[in-house]
Image (cartoon, coloured by chain):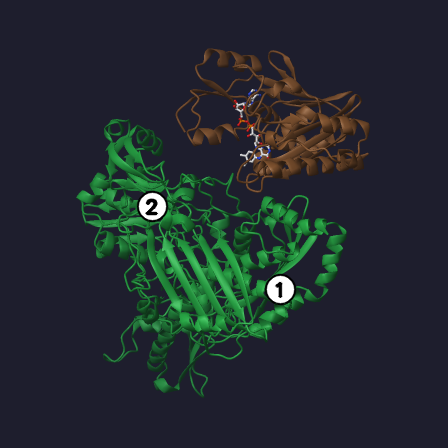
Chain colours: A brown, B green
Amino acid sequence: MYAFEYHRPTSVKEAASLAGGAEDAKFLAGGHTLLPTMKLRLAGPANLIDLGQIAELRGIERSGSAVTIGAMMKHAEVATSAEVKEAIPALAEMAELIGDPHVRNRGTIGGSIANNDPSADYPAACLALNATIVTNQRKVAADDFFQGIFTTALEEGEIITRVSFPIPSQAAYAKFRNPASRYALVGVFVAKHADGVRVAVTGAGSNGVFRVPEMEKALSGSFTPDALNGIAVPQDRMNSDIHADAAYRAHLVGVMARRAVQAAAARG
Amino acid sequence: MTATGIGAPVRRKEDQRFVTGQGRYVDDFNRPGQAYAYFLRSPHAHAIIRSIDTGPAMIMPGVIAVFTGDDLAADKIGGLICGWMIHSKDGSPMKAGPHPALAQGKVRYVGDHVAVVIAETLAQAKDAAEAIVVDYDVLPAVVDPAQATKASAQVHDVSPDNTVFNWHLGNKDEAEAAFARAKHITTIDLVNNRLVPNPIEPRAAVGEYDPGTDNYTLYTTSQNPHVARLVLSAFIGVAPEHKLRVIAPDVGGGFGSKIFIYAEETVCVWAAKKVKRPVKWTSDRTEAFLSDAHGRDHVTHAEMATDENGRIIGLRVHTVANLGAYLSTFSSSVPTYLYAPLLSGQYDIPAIYCEVDAVYTNTAPVDAYRGAGRPEATYVLERLVEKTARELGQDPAEFRRKNYITQFPHATPVIMTYDTGDYAASLDKALELADYKNFQQRKQESARRGKLRGIGFSSYIEACGIAPSQAVGSLGAGVGLWESAEVRVNPTGSVEVLTGSHSHGQGHETTFAQLVSDRLGIPIDQVSIVHGDTDKVQFGMGTYGSRSGAVGMSAIAKALDKVIAKGKKVAAHVLEASEGDIEFKDGRFGVAGTDRSMAFGEIALQAYIAHKFSGQDLEPGLKEGAFYDPTNFTFPAGVHICEVEIDPDTGVTKIERWTAVDDFGVIINPMIVEGQVHGGIAQGVGQALLEGAVYDQSGQLITASFNDYCMPRAIDLPSFQVGMTVTPCPSNPLGIKGCGEAGAIAAPPAVINAITDALGHEDIAMPATPQAVWRAAQKARMPMAAE
Ligand SMILES: Cc1cc2nc3c(=O)[nH]c(=O)nc-3n(C[C@H](O)[C@H](O)[C@H](O)COP(=O)(O)OP(=O)(O)OC[C@H]3O[C@@H](n4cnc5c(N)ncnc54)[C@H](O)[C@@H]3O)c2cc1C
């Protein structure tokens, strides 16, 4: 790790002004991506702004048609939240599938979304649930937020404060874990909304999380696994590495989509 | 059996400190004035070093010194050695290239040691390492052992075609004759995947020099501190043997990787004198992946000949073994004498011929890893036996039974003479525990759910209790493989046992104490086991090859016999009887036929006060030592049965059942033995399903972190059914065979045999990852689709 200045603001405003005034600053949330990168000397921010003491970034609220989660909420808190489990059980289950207990008790929803790792789980949930990412400056629809691997709509110094998830009528997440890292080799989140079904895939795409319009169309017609018969995602859009090549990933997208639909339908 | 004697499931004494965080590992030792070493490692797999400019690093904050290979050479520090000489078929000695602790002119793998920075803090040492300017001339690299002899890359000047040796064992003509008259021949091509050992504690070293006494101390993560001292003094020349103290304190696992003498500890001892400060180095996990000696990495073609009665009559094996960029300490013995002599397995095979071509590549050195050679042999043989049975349409269990050795001693055509065993007994018990007779029912039930179920056997044998010194000497070993022990009885009757074995997870502090408790009739809390310090224990050969029970404890048993004999002399004086009338039983020395007796502790006190000794005929004190050299290897053997269910849609293999029936001879502590079996199976399943070190064509290690290198987790394993059979080992006084490696040896073929059974074809390699199994399952479906 290289030397850095450490800051611990207590409000979003203070954090934003620190970021605005400091050279080469990074926000620190759970630190489960940022700190390993720093330890390996792959990142060396001059200023580290710890968001951990900011009360307004915490909390989970249900308001009629949506669940809103503070950016600093840990995966374990989302997984065990009574509000989330009742309103969007698929989201709680997704959070429960992240990493291991250590990771779930440090990693945050805001950090996960800001990082937009191509194998992370939250981006698929955001996209399928048609979430709104709220920052200290604006509101961004998930469809506009995720812009390719490790790339988002966030501007320099912009802070995610909350994520708002519309409550679907049915939803489920099916994850095929990378055996080594436990991130998603392929994860498919399906959600049935009043205006149609959304299907989002993480882990598989060479350009990060993506939606599958063909599946969405078919499932909007009939929300059953069989509706997916004959629909394949193109291999040339798939990622390929030592764990899974493009053909296998494309195949798994189909399998996981079916399993997600089955689970969502079973939930009724 | 007493509550703490031989055979009792005593809880591990050492666990109290381990589970409460009180263990003292090398990194926990901080010496006054300690500085930190950081190694600049090669980013290239193969390159000429044109120049190294350490100047910019020398002026960085906190830097004490920066050294390169030239500094070691100027001090006449020798290179690292390989301690086992192998001769090629043509009689020529193996081609050992130079192995400097810091590179001289060339780097040969990613992670090779280029320079070392010594600084006040580790962060400062790392900062300075970044400032060193190295001018590399990058050369083409070779990583694939099968291509090594044809590659344009030449790893060492001594070997133009990258061959270390072309070795063989067995009788070629007899094997050829057997194949000529065979009714059936089964062939197989296998890769034994390269593994990274990954003990939970990474390697570490602290070197210290005392200018007043000219004494050196090295704290190091070693499985054999005395061997480390011998090599560092006699061969590498960092310090005279009598001036170097090597301490291997609590060590968090080794699996073989901490047997070897590496560059880092060599440099720490040497640099401590140079900079007049203690020097510490602790590996991080990335360095461990890059520079710990890896395991396995064989490419093999093998053939099995059977006659018209379904009897195995011949075996031919050709293996290419990757030894990496340098010959690590015992690397040459692993694919040779620890491998081919096991190829007879549990079977009566009259003719065996094995050829091994060992090669250099631009990868980390490869050496012994849990099982060392024996898992590789077992994988070849048990895959081939299973395939043969299938091709002959025979039940794999009954095919094995028919070919088992039943008469002992049995001399195989590949050196070994098995002393004892009852292979059919283990098979019967395993079949029963595995509920083999209802397997077809379970398979049909899986099929109804769209799943593929398979069952696989592994009828393994291993040669442990390593090893008779004369035998290994005749095979090229540079050392003898006996063990030493010293039993020191204190005046209060408590006992310290100094042993040359080293415990790094095995539980010696418990099992060795159980032996003492059993023999002397004293509670185990009266016994301390002292190991891992060359200033305390006179000499020892360390722990590997499941040798600490069979060899290490036998030495203790011998020393205890001497203590009891001396105790009888003392008792004779004190009880005023003749020595021949003294009996030792249940912890008391008594005069036969009388009620006069004294407890062991009372006799110990008498030995030290010596008030009752007259004249010079009896020395005071009670302390005895012994060296024990085994008369043979030991041959643990058993049957493991693995049952898997495959999801053909995803390729996920789930292990549904695991049955292990092992014959380890006499068991000191069944709980610890079972733990060793569990851990071994976990590692074997790791190799079969999850683990694999992958280098890309340029020699970069792709799997250099746990993000990509998949270790087994509890969730990957079922609850194990563990059974035992016992045929006591006749070649050591305790009847022990050893249990440390069995699981890792038995497991891989059991898993792959189960998967191939489920798939209905043989085309799957380790690690059988979901992707590989999915693809293989597609292939299995194809003929069905074509029908
Ligand atoms: C072993 C391991 C396994 C894992 N497994 C999984 C898995 O299975 N699935 C999965 O999805 N994830 C997984 N993760 C990732 C983890 O769960 C976190 O989601 C991830 O590390 C990012 O969250 P964090 O809170 O740790 O963010 P940090 O590491 O603190 O930050 C990550 C990035 O986001 C920025 N950032 C953080 N918060 C904000 C904010 N509020 N506004 C703007 N920018 C911000 C930071 O500046 C930084 O650039 C794993 C991580 C580890 C170490």
Identified at 28% across, 38% down, the residue is B48
- Circle 2 Cα neighbour tier, 10 Å, few/some/many (<14 / 14–19 / ≥20): many
Kind of residue indicated by mark 1: Arg
Residue at (54%, 78%) from the top-left corner?
B406
Q: Is residue B571 left or right of residue A139?
A: left
Same subunit, labels 2 and 1: the answer reads: yes
Q: What residue is pinned by disc 1?
A: B390
Label 2, secondary structure: give it.
strand
| A179 left or right of B507 in image | right
Quadrant of the rendered image containing residue B82: bottom left
Beta carbon at label 2 within 8 Å of ligand 1: no
Residue type beneath disc 2: Ala
* Percent of width and height locating residue B191: 49, 53
Q: Is residue A212 visible?
A: yes
The residue to which callout 2 is attached is: B205
Mark 1 element type: helix
Near-viewer residue (B77 or B452):
B452
Q: Residues within 10 Å of mark 1 (few under 14, many from 20)?
A: some
Residue B431 in the image: x percent, y percent?
65, 67
